[in-house]
Image (cartoon, rainbow, N blue to C red):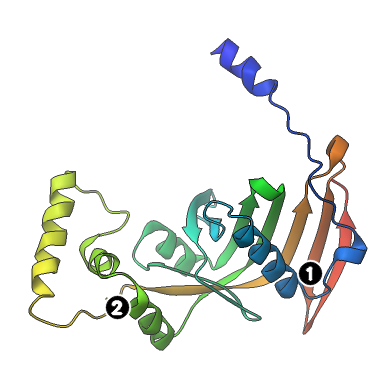
Amino acid sequence: MKELSKSIADLRVDYSLKKFDESDLIKNPMEQFEVWLDEAIQANVNEPNAMTLATVKADGAPSARVVLLKGISENGFVFFTNYESRKGQEILQNSKVCLVFCWLELQRQVRIEGEAIKISAEESDNYFKTRPLGSQIGAHASPQSKQVESREELERMYASFEELFTKQPIIRPEHWGGFRVKPQQIEFWQGRQNRLHDRFLFTKEENSWAFCRLAP
């Protein structure tokens, strides 16, 4: 354990790949995010739409996991989940959340703080129809975040719904759908040499955004 701890402590990365100055900054953070996301996609970053979603439990403790971004607009960031899952229930009890994108290949990070709100049933229906059949069946079969006895139990539930939907059309289950995170703050982080990283924080002020540079 001591040797591993020393190995971890000795890990170093030279953050010198890119810079991010005021002259590079788009004053609309949603547009700036789209530029960075597109660059991550073009750079073949692994799972560029993967984001850590942090929620708050009933006792005030933080809770985090990785989910996938599936939509973006001026109104916010959309992801989908089982509303009865742990994260779904935590959001319904406390809608304040944080998202983190980490694109290591580009030495970049984006942090987003805001409020998660259910999207319309129509929007959820439209996205559900685009999912692979197996994922559609899985949304019905998996009691997400609930305790199950075994892998075999999950596979039995999946097989049961798979057979059911050979006899009737498959539709989106009511307990599954999307949330839209409406951002209040968005921070862009670009790694730089000597740990003098570039950080810009955007804060929503009514219908506009204010921004400032933060010390690393």
Q: Height in image: 31 above or below 87?
A: below
Q: CA distance from mark 1 to mark 2?
A: 34 Å
Image quarter of residue 12: top right
In the rendered image, which quarter contains the C terminus? top right
| Left or right placement of residue 91 versus residue 145 in this view | right
Which mark sits nearer the N-terminus, 1 or 2?
2
Residue 174: give its label.
2
Give the percent coordinates (x, y) of residue 164: 9, 73
Q: Secondary structure at mark 2?
A: loop
| Left or right placement of residue 45 versus residue 150 in this view | right
Residue extending farthest to the right is 23
Residue flagged by tag 2: what amino acid is it? Glu
Residue at 92 percent across and 65 percent down: it is: 23
Circle 1 crowding by C-alpha within 10 Å: few under 14, some 14–19, many from 20: some
Residue at 41 percent across and 64 percent down: it is: 89
Residue flagged by tag 1: what amino acid is it? Thr
Q: Secondary structure at mark 1?
A: strand
| Left or right placement of residue 68 versus residue 113 in this view | left
Residue 203: give its label.
1
